[in-house]
Amino acid sequence: MKNDDPIQIMQEMLLVAQNGKPLTSEQVGLAMGAIFSGKVETPLIERWLRLISQRTPTAVEIFGGVQALMNSSTRIPTEIACEKIIDTAGTGGAPKMLNVSTLSALVIAACRGVVAKSGNRSRTGFGSSETLAALGVNIATEPAKQVKMLSECGFCFCLAPKHYPAARFATDARKAIGTPTLFNAIGPLANPAGALRQVVGVWSRDLLEPVAQVLARRGAIKAFVVHSADGFDEVSVCDKTYAVEIVRGRIMGDIVFEPEQFGISRSRSVPRASENLIDATTQFKRLVCGIDRGSSLDLVLINAALGLMVADKASDPKSAAALASEAIESGRVNSLLETVIRLSNQ
């Protein structure tokens, strides 16, 4: 018998989750729909998310969540084919050093890639969205302006609350939990411009295969899912990085990347982490301008390189990293940032 009451639906999905068995895509979709209605109280949402978070979500569960989030989203109505659009957003939930995914996204766009970079406000207060805003980017642009930015400069920032407003009803529950939830796995896979080229960093090695399966099922043209051996949701400059490659809707297999493959010397220590918003903003600008060197720049280059391979701008890690370096050294990345700031505020 069909039940249209969001509270009763959520209670039923809570009972299903308590059984300890994986949920179907339909069951996750029902739970997400109930949450997005705004009629379910935070404690009930929190209990359900905590139960799911006690284990690694399955590909079926993640897919159901992605479908529900996409169905509730405000899309970017660009005429640029989804097959050409790139995203570098990761799941979060791992230690953070720099705003690597956004720095990488700018490098890719400066090399003529088309990047619709997804992002959300961070738990630290100085993540990508806060840093871009501090630099002068209007991060809350409307879809019509994002269309223009993609067309004119090949980059736009997609702030999650603007595109998935109903997801706000889970915010308090997620904060109360304080660790990655199913929402973290879902978010990067629900790009509002429909990106089919992605680099997705995940918080756990156990998530590599499930996320890769969802990308394949959604028809990704080219993608990498990555997690480093030293615990980061990005490619490491200090250690090996585990990856799964997806090409044209098929999982091609597991790969292990080493820094030396990118023509970059292995660092003995992780790059210096940003300490606050002022520090993050200064560090971001110095890297974009090519002022900072060492492991911080290497981290940007090695991650941008993977994105350039996804964008089919380079065929191997070493040439991709060289292309990324040239984009920064030539001033193209800094010039692009200035253009993004200008266009986002017009």
Image: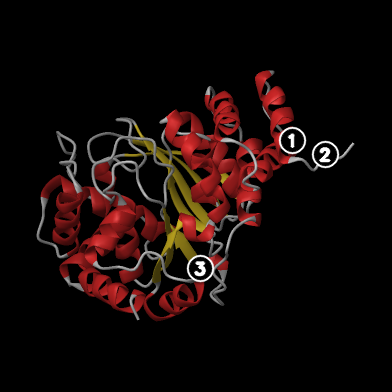
How far apart are the two marked residues, 2 and 1, measured between alpha carbons? 7 Å
Q: How busy is the neighbourhood of tag 2: few (under 14 within 10 Å), some, or many (20 plus)?
A: few
User: Percent from the top left, x then y, of residue 279?
Assistant: 14, 50
The type of residue carrying mark 2 is Asn
Which residue is label 1 attached to?
9
- In the image shown, does 286 or 135 lie closer to the viewer? 135
Residue 9 visible in image: yes
Which of the image's four quarters has the C terminus?
Answer: bottom left
Name the mark nearer the viewer: 3 or 1.
1
Q: Given contact means CB atoms under 8 Å apart, are the residues at marks 2 and 1 in contact?
A: yes
Q: Which mark is residue 3?
A: 2
Q: Given contact means CB atoms under 8 Å apart, are the residues at marks 2 and 3 in contact?
A: no
Q: Which comes before the other along the chain, label 2 or label 3?
A: 2
Q: Residue furthest top?
A: 19
User: Percent from the top left, x then y, of residue 197?
Assistant: 50, 58
Q: Residue at x 55, y 66 (%)?
A: 83
Q: How busy is the neighbourhood of tag 1: few (under 14 within 10 Å), some, or many (20 plus)?
A: many
- In the image shown, does 220 or 44 lie closer to the viewer? 44
The type of residue carrying mark 3 is Lys
User: Percent from the top left, x then y, of residue 133?
Assistant: 29, 62
Q: Which mark is residue 84?
A: 3
Query: Measured along the vertical axis of the image, is residue 191 above or below residue 332?
Result: above
- In the image shown, does 259 or 170 lie closer to the viewer? 170
Label 3 SS: helix
Query: Measured along the vertical axis of the image, is residue 272 above or below residue 283?
Result: above
Q: Residue at x 60, y 51 (%)?
A: 69
